Image: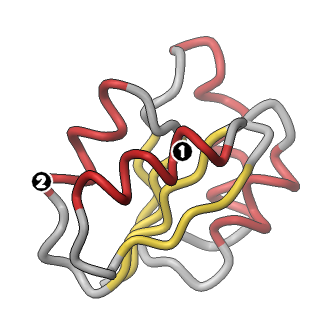
Amino acid sequence: MKVLIVGAGGQGGSCASILASVDEIRLVDLKEETAKAVADHIGGGKIRTGTVNALDPDDVARAAEGVDVVVDMVMPWLVPYVMEGALKAKA
């Protein structure tokens, strides 16, 4: 299973730790350095990092291309944008 986690802060980082047994985690954030710091802390080599603008459903869809599940760990007011992007990516 491949998982995209949008938001690499306190919730997203913890979620990535818990999901470390899946095949691949894409951990994306507005600031890739935040996602990279979490990935480095977790280790294991299954986490790919990147950037995403959670306000842009097309950017979320780009990040979600090919994943099975999108986990939304951003601020609640961003949920509609992330979910629209997830639907566009058929995740």
Residue at x 21%, y 78% (from the top left corner): 22
- Number of numbered callouts drawn: 2
Q: Is residue 49 above or below residue 51?
A: below
Q: Please name the amino acid that badge 1 sits on.
A: Val
Secondary structure at numbered mark 2: helix
Residue at x 58%, y 52% (from the top left corner): 28
Q: Position of residue 36 (x, y in %)?
A: 50, 53
Disc 1 crowd rating (10 Å Cα; few below 14, some 14-19, many 20+) is many
Q: CA distance from mark 2 to mark 1?
A: 15 Å
The colour scheme applied to this rendered structure is secondary structure
Quick check: 34 left or right of 41? right
Query: Decide: marks 2, 1 in contact (CB < 8 A)?
Result: no
Quick check: 64 left or right of 7? right
Which of the image's four quarters has the C terminus?
bottom right
Q: Position of residue 81 (x, y in %)?
A: 73, 34
Determine the image quadrant of residue 25.
bottom left
Q: Mark 1 sits on what residue?
A: 6
Q: Position of residue 9 (x, y in %)?
A: 43, 28
Q: Is residue 22 above or below residue 59?
A: below
Residue at x 35%, y 58% (from the top left corner): 40
Secondary structure at numbered mark 1: strand
Q: Earlier in the sequence, mark 2 or mark 1?
A: 1
Nearest the camera: 16 or 64? 16
Disc 2 crowd rating (10 Å Cα; few below 14, some 14-19, many 20+) is few
Q: Mark 2 sits on what residue?
A: 18
Q: Position of residue 59 (x, y in %)?
A: 84, 54
Q: Please name the amino acid that badge 2 sits on.
A: Ile
Residue at x 18%, y 68% (from the top left corner): 20
Which of the image's four quarters has the N terminus?
bottom left
In the image, which disc is placed on residue 81?
Answer: none
